[in-house]
Amino acid sequence: MTLPEARALARQLADAASDEVTTDWAAGIAVLARLDGRSWLLVDQGARASTYGDGTPVSGVRGWMSTTLAEPSGFVAVVTSLHVDGRFRERAVGVLGAMPGEVAAPALAVRLLDHVPAVRERAWESLRDLLRADTAEAVFDVLLAGVNRQHSPAALDRASGALLDDVPLSDLVAQLAQSDRRRVRRWAFQLGHERDLFTIEQLVLAAQDDADQWIRASCAEWLMQAPDPGVMARLLGARSVEARLVGLTRVPEAILGDSALGSLLLDRAPRVREQARWRARRRGWDIPAFYRRALADENASPRVLVACLDGLADLGGEQDVEAAVSALRHSSGRVRAAAVVTVEARASSAEAVELLTPALVDPSARVSTAAARALARLGVPPAAAEPAWSSDMPSGRRAAWRLARAAGGWHRVEADLRGAADPDPHLSGLGRTGLRNWLDVSAATTWEPLPEGQRARIASWLDRAGLGQDQQQVLAFHAGIKLAGADREPRSDGDVSVTVPARRGRWLRLLRRT
């Protein structure tokens, strides 16, 4: 939910609350029950935010203190608790204490963060009786979403302290650790770890298979403090990269078998492979020879081939160029992209340029992008991208844009103009973004002399790049392109005039008079 959407929803809720149509109230309750903590805070913000066009969604005096405020669903009281006037909010939170907790509890949690002390105190008096195990998730979701607000720490302490008077800490953590609300679940894991409520087995299982990446990484980090380092071996096969890294870093040499280390050298994650190479070097392994043997296996999967090529790019030699060139013809785009990096790392510069230039028009965008970056690092001139500019594939033209743009200076401007004029929406967006960035940041510091031929090409692309008239005018000024006739094309004799109407402000006329 965005803030404009929250304002629109607050307006709809206010309109429904002002009518005495109970079906609208029921529909409003259903909408409010689906909000998460962040959305509650956004609706609260939107309800009291004023704009010139339509004022403040939940405001005014008439009707808010009618008898419908205490209607049994609690909808009218919830909407009134969002009112811009603190007196209305204080009255509404007093009524919400007797309402069903499904929506009243998170609405009162919002008011625990209120800037008016009287509203906060009245909200706490009402929430204290509604705060139970079944309403805790919604309340904590709101308070954790507003964790950076001034009154959030005090509200969290109050709510957790009151809840723990009735529910044992272990039961509360066990319940909230199963919550569907991400903030609540992470908070429960953090609290459980601080209070030493999780067993090693529970942390291992969470580090291996939990759906939340933050929980997987946190549990793996907490396991580093385990008294028995042998438990780290169970993390070597975890789904989480962070867990495998922790296991590989901490598992003792006596427990880390050769077969396990060999599997980790072929891991799908580059960070794990790099750490595994460090462990293998400590054992005195010939790591390039290991990768060469695995690469020669005809039944090796694309994942294994990528790992081998990555390892040879890091530790191989000239003898590995032939295998990398052969991998450039592999059916898998991932393998070909890895082969591009290996060729760049292990072949001579001239040989790498010759081998990688055709990859600019590879059917796989992953490969063409890797080739463009490699050729740019090798210092290939922008002219090498011309065949790719003519490609029928958008990925090939994007690779040409990357390569030509990497030369910097006016080559960057020309590449961005050419990309902005491309029929591919993604490439044209990249080109226009690059041009705006150049005008904002780099135009005044581009001192490289602009050859006349390149100036003519820039002028020819200027009208086709989809820029606004002001942007064309500024870019033409920096490029030294004369602005003249409106519809005239640049002449072949070097006159590259482009028409943009001149703007004469009052201050210019006054300047001429002086």
Image (tube, rainbow, N blue to C red):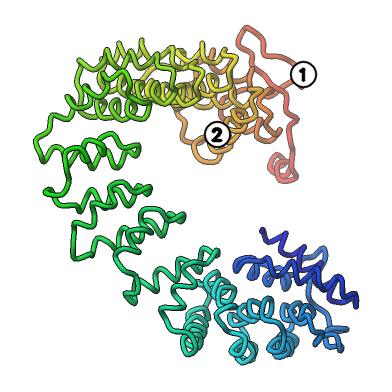
Task: Give the x, y percent position of residue 142.
Answer: 58, 73
Side (left or right) of 350 relative to 102: left
User: Residue 195 or 81: which is nearer the viewer?
Assistant: 195
User: Disc 2 or disc 1, which is closer to the eye?
Assistant: 2
Residue 210: percent from left, percent from top = 43, 56
Residue to which mark 2 is pinned: 434
State which tag comes first along the sequence, 2 or 1: 2
Quadrant into which the C terminus falls: top right
Mark 2 and mark 1 in contact? Answer it, CB < 8 Å. no
State the residue position of label 1.
487
Instruction: Name the amino acid, label 2.
Output: Gly
Q: Which mark is residue 307?
A: none
- Residue 109: tell me if it is visible: yes
**On screen, residue 197 above or below 290:** below
Q: CA distance from mark 2 to mark 1?
A: 26 Å
Q: Residues within 10 Å of mark 2 (few under 14, many from 20)?
A: many
